[in-house]
Structure formats: C-alpha cells, structure tokens
Amino acid sequence: MSPRPLSGSSAADAAAVGREQTRQRVIEAAIDLLTRGGRDAVTTRAVAEGAGLQPPAIYRLFGDKDGLLDAVAEHGFATFLATKHVDPDPRDPIEDLRAGWNVAVEFGLANPALYTLMYSEPTRATSAAFKAGMEILMGRVRRLAAGGWLRVDEELAAQIIHATARGAVLTWLSLPEDRRSPALLTTLREAMVAAVTNQQPAVQDAGPAGAARALHAALPEQTTLSGAEQYLLREWLDRLAADG
C-alpha cells in the first residue's frame, strides 16, 4: 500500500521543520568553527562543508555571512538565557545579585569566542533573547529596589551590573593565561555590589507601605520641595503607609 501523499499544509509544515533543522545544523557548524579558529575561520565555504551543504544554501538561509553571524549570536543569547535561574522571592537579594552576576561571567568564560561575537556589535542588543535576559536582570533590580537595597536608580543599576559582568569577561579573555587572577573577578563583582546596593535596606518593611514610612521619616530633612509640595506628599505617604 503506497503512503498517502501529504496535504498542502502538512507538506508546508514538513518543509518548515526541515528548513529549521538545516538552519540549526549550519549554526552549530559555524559555532564549532568559531570555537576552534575564531571569527576568521567562519567562512561560508567552511561552514557549508561542516554542515554538509553547498555554499549557496548559506545565502538562501541567512542572506550573507553577516546574517549567519547574527544568527549565531542570537543562538548564543538564547543559550545564555537558558542558564539563568529566576527566583521570584530570594531569601537574600544581595546573594541573588551575586549569583546572577557569576552566572553571566561563567557563561562568558566557558564560551569565549561565542561571547566575544555576541557582544562585538551594539546592534545585537535588539536580539529577542538578549532583551529577555535583560528583563530577568531588571526583575532582579526591581526586587532590590522594592526591598530598599538599591542605592541608585533601577536603569543605572542594570547598566552597572551588565557592564561590569561584560567587562570582567572581556578583560579576563584579553589577558595572558598566566596573568588571569580569580581575584580580578571577585573584586569587580564586589565593586558592582557596593556601587548599586546599600549595606542595610533603606526600607525595613518591603512593599509600598514600608517605603512610604521610610520616605515620610526622611521628608523633614530635605529642602528640594516647597512647603505646599511637602504637605501634599506627606498626605499621599500617610495614605500609603496606612494601607500597610
């Protein structure tokens, strides 16, 4: 009995799956070349040979070599994203910050060529996986802020955390092996922690009510607001504190 021919939609689905499998095979071949020989080793001919394809297939799938490298970087961001652990309610938010920073640095040190490619082009910040990773970081920063631990605004804190991790990896990779001291990574991490967090939470009780009480207590010491503005803010803070 001959097999029943695929319907139009089934044939299209099978073709899409086959295309994605081929695309993944090309990306893996490119990563292998990148890891063994650096960016210069990633030529369309070498990648095609590694994937068992003809060079024109690379252009059909990715447009050009730059498109292929962008796809490799996106794969790197997605792989990195999969290593991130999200704890929505960490027992110690400062240790959670350290752990997240360590994960980022460890990924870079374990995948030096891929990591360098991922962060070699500013335009790769548009990557969907990169954005998802930054949302995880912003969530960690918001939890610090809500607990009264943050000493700078959230956007600046996220920039400092991201920049120090990336800088730590790229600096480490630029050094000769005999000059790579683990103390460099530890010192940079602790400098980051000191730059973005307080030693003790400014708000003892988490949540809007605790923050309102802390701000209410500090209000008489500031001179930025006028008397009328202070009166209005105090009324709002009283309402928020009462809700707690």
Image: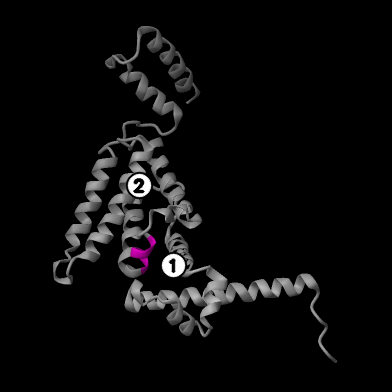
**Amino acid type indicated by mark 1:** Leu
Place of residue 88 in the rendered image (x, y in percent of width and height, measured from the top left): 46, 48
Q: In this view, does 102 lie above or below 221?
A: below
Q: Measuring 45% from the left and 55% from the top, which residue is drawn there?
A: 130
Q: In this view, does 34 lie above or below 167?
A: below
Q: Which of marks 1 and 2 is nearer the N terminus?
A: 1
If the image is split into quadrants, where does the N terminus sit? bottom right
Q: Is residue 33 above or below residue 228?
A: below
* Stretch of the chain drawn in magenta: 114-118
Q: In this view, does 197 lie above or below 23?
A: above
Q: Looking at the magenta stretch, what is its main secondary structure?
A: helix
Q: Mark 2 points at which residue?
A: 92
Q: Would residue 116 be counted in the magenta stretch?
A: yes
Q: Measuring 38% from the left and 23% from the top, which residue is drawn there?
A: 213
Secondary structure state at the residue bearing disc 2: loop
Say which of 141 and 1 sits in front.
1
Q: Name the residue under label 1.
A: 69
Packing grade of label 1 (10 A; few <14, some 14-19, many >=20) is many
Place of residue 155 in the rendered image (x, y in percent of width and height, measured from the top left): 38, 39
- Residue 101 sits in quarter: bottom left
Q: In this view, does 95 lie to the left or right of 50?
A: left
Q: In this view, does 118 lie to the left or right of 10?
A: left
- Residue 38 sits in quarter: bottom left
Q: Distance between the residues labelled 1 and 2?
A: 39 Å
Query: Of the residues tagged 1 and 2, which is closer to the observer?
Result: 1
Say which of 10 and 231 sits in front.
10
